[in-house]
Amino acid sequence: MSPEPLQVNRRIILRCATQEVGCVAEKIEKRIDSSTLELIEEDAKELRLNEAGIVIFRTEKPIVVEKFPFVEELGRFVIEHEYNLQGAGIIAE
């Protein structure tokens, strides 16, 4: 993954299945240490390399997604910024 942090309100690309759409991380509700699963910060402004989080994305246009347990292909995604992979995730809600 990219060493560049995921930042709130910076335009990125979200890919889910065959869909690609511009979006922003509207809110990073929780920033979590991926090694210990301890909460680092609530209402964070960025996620750094090797951190996990609960993030709300706002897409530029509607896309089809589904919660991961129901349709895995539509329940996972990757995000990138300037052709650098920034992260991956699953749809929880």
Image: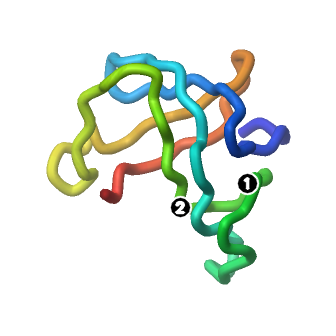
C-beta proximity under 8 Å, tags 2 and 1? no
Q: Position of residue 70 (x, y in %)?
A: 15, 51
* Mark 1 lies on residue: 47
Q: Quadrant of the C terminus?
A: bottom left
Q: Is residue 64 visible?
A: yes
The disc label shown at residue 68, or none = none
Quick one: SS at disc 1?
Answer: strand
**Label 2 environment density (alpha carbons within 10 Å; few <14, some 14–19, many ≥20):** some
Q: Amino acid at mark 2?
A: Ile
Instruction: Tell me the residue at 83%/38% (across/down).
Output: 4
Residue at 72%, 62% in the rendered image = 44
Alpha-carbon neighbours of circle 1 within 10 Å: few (<14), some, or many (≥20)?
many
Q: Earlier in the sequence, mark 2 or mark 1?
A: 1
Q: What residue would you read off at disc 2? A: 54
The answer to whether residue 69 is above or below residue 89 is below
**In this view, 3 is above or below 93:** above
Three-letter code for the amino acid on which mark 1 is drawn: Leu
